[in-house]
Amino acid sequence: MSMDYIFLIVLLVAMILMMVFQTRKAKKQQAERQSFWKNLDAGTEVITIGGVIGKVVEVDEEYDEIVIDSEGSILRFSSKAISREYIRPAYVSDDDVDENGNPLVKDDENDADSPKEITTQVSEHSTDADGDEIDVEETTKSTKSPYDAD
């Protein structure tokens, strides 16, 4: 029976420790949110809990409201509806990276107007004098400007 009591005590202590750490974490997050709301100024780009993105126009501390401008629409929210400051994620086109996500080295922009050499390879099957099949490859190179019609 003493083993059961030891297990029960260890389990109880572990649960108490988890509750203490969760409470401390929640208090820290709440303090960060309060600080964020108090430091909101006009011009700060924010996102609401509903996903509306806009710039802060006015903060009314008396009524605990905030006015944001979302692409010309002026909206009034409770300050608690502001989720966080909005930071637009960087957009990288698939044309600018390789298959592993590494950036590609770009040539000069002036090279876009210069003619490009195009190599075309054609494979044909042919037979020799004995009737055996042989592969004939023909390679042609041409210079083509990006302005030429295909």
Image (cartoon, grey):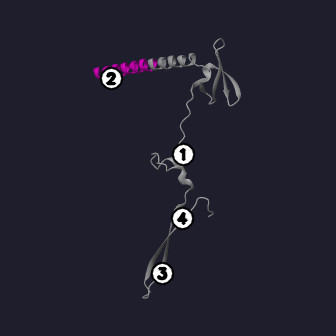
Q: Is residue 48 visible to the viewer in this orientation of the structure?
A: no
* Residue nearest the observer in this picture, 137 or 143: 143
Residue at the far right in the pictured view: 73
The Cα–Cα distance between marks 4 and 3, rounded to whole angstroms, is 29 Å
Residue type pointed to by label 2: Phe
Residue for badge 2:
7
Residue for badge 1:
93
Local SS, label 2: helix
Q: Is residue 81 magenta?
A: no
Nearer the viewer's eye, disc 4 or disc 1?
Answer: 4
Residue for badge 4:
143
| Residue at the spot 32% in from the left edge and 19% down from the top edge | 5
Q: Quadrant of residue 62?
A: top right
The Cα–Cα distance between marks 1 and 2, rounded to whole angstroms, is 56 Å
Residue at the far left in the pictured view: 2
As drawn, 7 above or below 105 = above
Residue type pointed to by label 4: Thr
Q: Is residue 135 visible to the viewer in this orientation of the structure?
A: yes
